[in-house]
Amino acid sequence: MSYTTNKHVDGSFDEVVETTIDALEDAGFGVLCDIDVQATFEKKLDESFRQYRILGACNPELAHRGLEDELELGTLLPCNVVVYEDDAGDVVVSAVDPGQLLAVADNPALESVGDDASERFEQVFEQL
């Protein structure tokens, strides 16, 4: 079973990153962190790597609901969305499957949070 949802998106890498951030915001997510993996590897390791950005997305309402039911849930937050260039040079957006992520907690009370987050990520992918 896959733990991500992926979509190839037309456009330049930077355009797709911005479109993804906008779509996340439209779905109620804020981007708490934006990690430029390519720049980090270049600076810290002196290694080249494909364009790859990790967007730490969080919906405060969903996070609050989840943390009320499972205090340790914070170790799984925020939900990560990545934008990267694949081997063919295409731009791909990939998001964690919230249901798979929350299944780790083995807490049935989190199912509605996962369902809500999944619906919101579907909305994001429809906008891309």
Image (tube, rainbow, N blue to C red):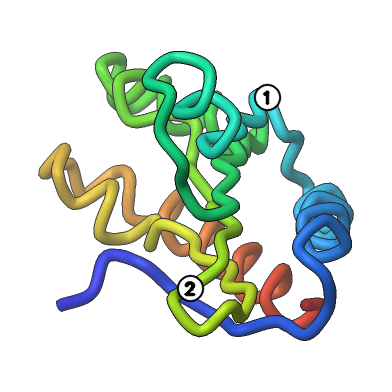
Q: Amino acid at mark 1?
A: Leu
Query: Percent from the top left, x then y, of residue 94?
Result: 50, 65
Quarter of the rendering occupied by the N terminus: bottom left
Q: Amino acid at mark 2?
A: Asp
Q: Earlier in the sequence, mark 2 or mark 1?
A: 1
Structural crowding at the residue carrying mark 2, measured as other residues with C-alpha within 10 Å and reported as few (<14), some (14–19) or many (≥20):
few
Look at the picture and state if 8 lies above or below 51: below
**Helix or strand or loop: what does disc 2 sit on?**
loop
Mark 1 and mark 2 in contact (Cβ < 8 Å)?
no
Disc assigned to residue 17: none
**Helix or strand or loop: what does disc 1 sit on?**
strand
The residue at 61%/40% (across/down) is: 55
Query: Percent from the top left, x then y, of residue 98?
Result: 39, 56
Q: Nearer the viewer, residue 70 or 35?
A: 35
Query: Percent from the top left, x then y, of residue 120?
Result: 65, 63
Disc assigned to residue 32: 1
Q: Nearer the viewer, residue 47 or 112?
A: 47
Drawn side of residue 43 relative to residue 19, left or right:
left
Drawn side of residue 115 relative to residue 103, left or right:
right
Drawn side of residue 128 relative to residue 101, left or right:
right
In this figure, which residue is indicated by the disc labeled 2? 86
How far apart, in angstroms, are the residues tagged by discs 2 and 1? 25 Å
Query: Percent from the top left, x then y, of residue 15?
Result: 88, 62
Q: Report the number of discs.
A: 2
Look at the picture and state if 84 lies above or below 123: above
Q: Quadrant of residue 4?
A: bottom left
Structural crowding at the residue carrying mark 1, measured as other residues with C-alpha within 10 Å and reported as few (<14), some (14–19) or many (≥20):
few
Q: Nearer the viewer, residue 105 or 20?
A: 20
Drawn side of residue 49 relative to residue 33, left or right:
left
The residue at 57%/73% (across/down) is: 92
